[in-house]
Amino acid sequence: MRGRRPDEVPTRTFDWGTIKWLVTPHLDEGAGLTTGEVVIYPGQGHAPHVHPNEEEVIYVISGEGAQTVGDGPAFPIREGDAVYIPANTLHSTDNTTWRPLRLVVVYTPGGAETGLDELPDARILEPGVASRWTQAG
């Protein structure tokens, strides 16, 4: 593999943000992990959820937010922070500012991320097609 650029892969859009999977077992033969860029729109976040068999690491590229891991209280995250989420642990991420919250996420083992495509608000845009943000009412 020579590398992969974000504009070469589909964009998964949700009511709360977007995901670009850059390395996955589905794209890269032999890959044992998944990594991608997540953008959480201002004032949005995703519902608390669990990855039954995957560990996750979140690295904050830019922006600020609130993170939960397990049954502890939400804590602030910002540019440069990294968060480890053990397998089978309830967690959520919210953008608490007016700027986009940009994250790099890594799942190990990879592959289960395809389940997100089945969510009711999931839309898949072809490579090179820009997502459109909408104003919340």
Image: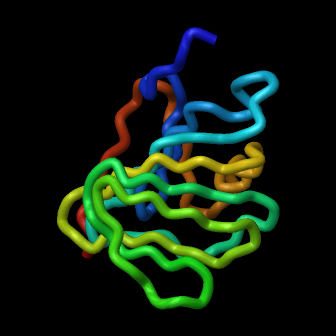
Q: Residue furthest left?
A: 98
Closest to the observer: 65 or 80?
80
Residue at image x 73%, y 54%?
A: 115
Given the current orientation, which residue lies at the most extreme top position? 2
Q: Quadrant of the C terminus?
A: bottom left
Q: Quadrant of residue 120?
A: bottom right
Q: Is residue 136 left or right of residue 32?
A: left
Left or right, 118 with respect to 8, comes to right
Q: How many marks?
A: 0
Instruction: Give percent across and percent down for residue 102.
Output: 35, 51
Tell me if residue 124 comes above or below residue 75 in the rendering: above
Colour scheme in the image? rainbow
47 relative to 87, above or below: below
44 to 26, vertically: above or below: below
The N terminus - image quarter: top right
Out of 86 and 25, give the one closest to the viewer: 86
x and y percentages locating residue 114 in the rendered image: 71, 47
Residue occupying the point 53% across, 32% down: 10
Q: Residue 65 appears in which quarter of the rendering? A: bottom left
Name the residue located 77 percent from the left edge and 47 percent from the top edge.
109
Give residue 25's position: percent from left, percent from top.
76, 33
Relative side of 92 to 118, left or right = left
Residue 13 position in % (x across, y down): 48, 50
